[in-house]
C-alpha cells in the first residue's frame, strides 16, 4: 500500500514516497477531500456553540459526545484492542486532534473571527508534511515541496492581509494548535495503515473519555450555559461531523495516499471555511479570496501529481 512508510530501525537513507497509482490516488484524494469538507465547518460550528457555551464546555462536551458514538461503534463491531506498540501513536492522536487542536482553536475564536482563524490554520498542510517527513523519514520531489511552500505562502499572505499584518493572542493559540495537530495527523495517518481509520479515531476518543467527562462536568458547572438552536447544532456537528466522521475518512485517505499528500488537500480548507463564514455567520469575504482560492487549488494539483 502506498503512503509514508516508516524507515527500518537500522540507519539508512531516507525513503522516497512514490506517487500512488491513478485509481488508488483518486480514491485516497476523495476520502481526504471528504474529511476536509467536514473540517471546513469546524470553525463556524465552534462559533455557533460558543453562543451558548463557554470554551471549556465546548471542548469537553464535543469529546464526550464523539467518544460515546465511537465507543458504541467499537463495541458493536467488536473491534479488537490495539496492540501495545500502537498506543503511543494513539496518545499522540488523542493529545493532538482530540484535545489540543479543539481546545486551542476554541480559545483563539474568543478573540479571532472564524475567517481569520481559518487562513492561519491554512499552514497546517505544510506543518503536517514537514512533521511526517522527519518522523517517518520520507522524501518528496522538489516539485512537491515547491508547491507546498507556495500554497502555504499564499495562505499566510492572505492571513496577514486579513489581520492588517500584526499577529494577535489568538494567532499564538492557532500556531500552537498547528504543532499539536500536525503530530496527531501524522501519527494517526501512519497508524491507519495498520487498522481502519474509524478505529484510530475511535480508540483515541475512548482514551480521552474519562478525563473529558470529568472536565465537562466541571466546565458546565463553572461556565454559563444558554441553550440555543445554534449552540446545539454547532456542538453536535463538532462531535459527530468534525471529531468523528471527518477524522474517519481523513485517516483512511492518509493511509491510501500518504500523510504528506493527503495533508496538501487541506490547503483548500481555509477557503471553504471562508465560504461557510459568509453563508452561516454573515462575515465579510475579502475580494482577494477568489484569487487565493485559485492559487491554492493549483498548488494542490501539483502536490498530488508530484512523484518522488
Image: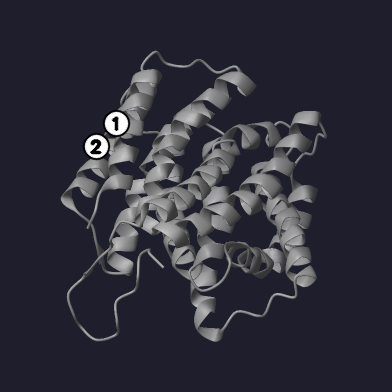
Q: CA distance from mark 2 to mark 1?
A: 6 Å
Image-based side of 53 in relation to 256, left or right: right
Helix, strand or loop at mark 1: helix
Residue 73 or residue 161, whichever sits in front: 73
Q: Is residue 126 visible?
A: yes
Helix, strand or loop at mark 2: helix
Residue 302 or residue 124, whichever sits in front: 302
**Up-down: is 243 above or below 285?**
below
Q: Which mark is residue 154?
A: 1
Image-based side of 304 in relation to 182, left or right: left
Q: Quadrant of residue 172?
A: top left
Measured as percent of width and height from the top left, residue 142 is found at 16, 50
Measured as percent of width and height from the top left, residue 107 is found at 55, 42
- Tell me the residue at 69%/67% (across/down): 206
Q: Which mark is residue 88?
A: none
- Tell me the residue at 43%/35% (across/down): 268
Screen quadrant of the C terminus: bottom left
Screen quadrant of the N terminus: bottom left
Residue furthest right in the image: 227
Q: Is residue 112 visible?
A: no
Q: Which mark is residue 150?
A: 2
**Up-down: is 274 above or below 69?**
above
Measured as percent of width and height from the top left, residue 275 is found at 53, 24
2 and 1 marks in contact (CB < 8 Å): yes
Image-based side of 128 in relation to 44, left or right: left
Residue 224 or residue 161, whichever sits in front: 161
Label 1 CA crowd tier, 10 Å (few <14, some 14–19, many 20+) = many
- Tell me the residue at 44%/67% (across/down): 190
Amino acid at each position: 500500500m502506498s503512503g509514508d512508510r516508516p524507515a527500518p530501525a537500522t540507519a539508512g537513507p531516507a525513503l522516497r514516497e512514490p506517487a500512488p497509482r491513478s485509481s488508488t490516488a483518486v480514491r485516497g484524494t476523495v476520502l481526504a477531500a471528504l474529511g476536509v469538507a467536514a473540517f471546513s465547518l469546524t470553525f463556524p460550528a465552534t462559533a455557533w456553540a460558543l453562543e451558548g457555551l463557554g470554551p471549556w464546555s465546548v471542548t469537553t462536551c464535543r469529546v464526550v459526545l464523539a467518544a460515546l458514538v465511537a465507543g458504541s461503534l467499537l463495541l458493536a463491531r467488536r473491534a479488537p484492542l490495539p496492540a501495545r506498540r500502537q498506543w503511543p501513536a494513539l496518545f499522540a492522536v488523542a493529545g493532538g486532534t482530540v484535545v489540543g487542536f479543539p481546545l486551542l482553536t476554541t480559545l483563539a475564536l474568543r478573540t479571532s473571527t472564524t475567517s481569520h482563524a481559518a487562513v492561519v490554520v491554512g499552514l497546517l498542510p505544510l506543518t503536517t508534511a514537514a512533521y511526517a517527513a522527519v518522523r517517518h523519514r520520507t522524501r518528496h520531489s522538489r516539485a512537491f515541496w515547491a508547491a507546498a511552500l507556495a500554497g502555504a505562502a499564499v495562505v499566510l499572505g492572505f492571513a496577514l492581509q486579513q489581520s492588517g499584518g500584526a499577529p494577535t493572542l489568538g494567532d499564538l493559540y492557532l500556531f500552537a494548535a498547528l504543532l499539536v495537530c500536525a503530530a496527531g495527523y501524522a501519527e494517526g495517518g501512519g497508524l491507519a495503515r495498520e487498522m481502519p481509520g474509524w478505529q484510530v479515531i475511535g480508540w483515541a476518543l475512548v482514551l480521552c473519555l474519562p478525563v473529558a467527562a470529568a472536565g465537562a462536568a466541571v466546565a458546565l458547572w463553572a461556565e454559563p450555559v444558554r441553550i440555543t438552536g445554534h449552540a446545539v447544532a454547532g456542538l453536535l456537528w463538532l462531535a459527530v461531523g468534525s471529531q468523528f466522521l471527518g477524522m474517519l475518512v481523513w485517516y483512511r485517505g492518509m493511509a491510501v495516499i500518504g500523510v504528506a499528500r493527503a495533508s496538501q488537500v487541506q490547503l483548500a480548507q481555509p477557503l471553504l471555511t471562508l465560504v461557510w463564514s459568509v453563508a452561516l455567520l454573515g462575515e465579510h469575504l475579502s475580494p482577494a479570496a477568489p484569487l487565493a482560492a485559485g492559487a491554492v487549488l493549483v498548488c494542490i494539483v501539483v502536490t498530488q501529481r508530484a512523484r518522488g
